[in-house]
Image (cartoon, rainbow, N blue to C red):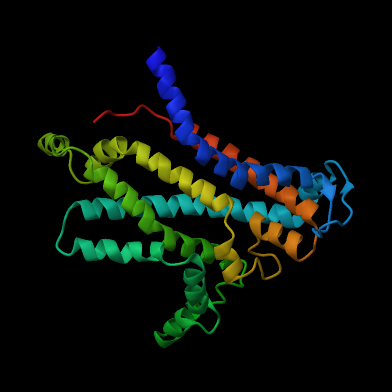
Amino acid sequence: MDQLRKNTKTILVFLLPSLIVYTIMLMAPIGGSLVISLFKWNGIRNSKMAFVGFQNFLRVFADPKVALAVKNIAWYLVLSLLTQLPLGLLLAVILNAGFKGYKVFKTMFFVPQVLSTTVVALVWYFILMPVGVLNNILNMAGLQSLARMWLVEPSSAITSIILVNSWAGVGFHMTVTYAAISAIPDEIMEAALLDGCAGIRRVFHIIIPMIWNSITSCIIIIVTGIIKQFDMVFVMTEGGPNGLTEVPSTLLYKEAFRMANFGKASAIGVCIFISSVLVTIASLRLAKRDQIEL
């Protein structure tokens, strides 16, 4: 028992610097946002802060722009989960086959991960703009009927941004799931083949159950990343046209730095934080299942 207490003290000593940094850099700003959300304030130092209670939250819930932003982020979340993780897992399974040139294949899909999100967004903006690369290719191929204003039309604007974000994120989930698949003992794979479990059956009955913890981690990363999504949307459309591609974080930015309404912006930030926590907990519960020991 004494040894355990000594170890606990040692652990706490080593954790203390990180805990201090975490508190200053993350917990303090969250607390500050919660306090500011209860005031009407223009963000200027020494200017008057009028206490309004929960009025900022009521304004957020009554704002039709917020409702559209929530709808967009919900679609963003669903489509991202249906594209990033399944495609990443599929690529990981293909890579695990160890075909000739698989390293080049892996590098190709991982490249977007080492690029800045701003760079990726700008490249795809010039591809998807009305006179961009994609429409020019469609016109040259005689497929003018398929050309459209990808980032302007209601039927394609937010979906185009989501697919670009998925394209950029697939490489990460491919790498994570590939590492997990590579850790599965060869004996298990060989036994599955001997039992006639091959192809798609092996993926669903052997690979997915044995890498479920890694899949759960990928789900959490996608969920938390999407809820606070900002840079991809802001660079490509700034939430336009007419708020069509608005998401909560872009609304937060505009309320704070364009409308000088830091109280309402902080209320949006608090809602984003609470939503992120709740959705993460829900994702963990939905993804929870018995772990298979290797």
Q: Residue at x 37, y 50 (%)?
A: 86
Task: Please state the horizontal and vertical placement of residue 291, each as a whole percent of the image.
Answer: 33, 29
Above or below 118: residue 145: below
The quadrant in which the N terminus is found is top left
Task: Please state the horizontal and vertical placement of residue 139, each as a whole percent of the image.
Answer: 45, 85
Question: Is residue 219 shown left or right of residue 104?
Answer: right
Above or below 15: residue 228: below
The quadrant in which the C terminus is found is top left
In terms of image quadrants, where is residue 230?
bottom right
Residue reaching furthest to the left: 194
Task: Please state the horizontal and vertical placement of residue 100, each as a whole percent of the image.
Answer: 14, 63
Task: Please state the horizontal and vertical placement of residue 136, each as a whole percent of the image.
Answer: 46, 85
Give the total of numbered labels: 0
Q: Residue at x 43, y 28 (%)?
A: 10
In terms of image quadrants, where is residue 143?
bottom left
Q: Is residue 49 visible?
A: yes
Question: Is residue 130 shown left or right of residue 42?
Answer: left
Pick whichever, 54 or 22, lies toward us. 22
Q: Residue at x 85, y 56 (%)?
A: 46
Question: Is residue 180 shown left or right of residue 6?
Answer: left
In terms of image quadrants, where is residue 276?
top right
Pick whichever, 276 or 141, lies toward us. 276
Q: Is residue 247 visible?
A: no
Residue reaching furthest to the bottom: 140
Q: Residue at x 32, y 53 (%)?
A: 175
Above or below 132: residue 25: above
Question: Is residue 115 shown left or right of residue 103?
Answer: right
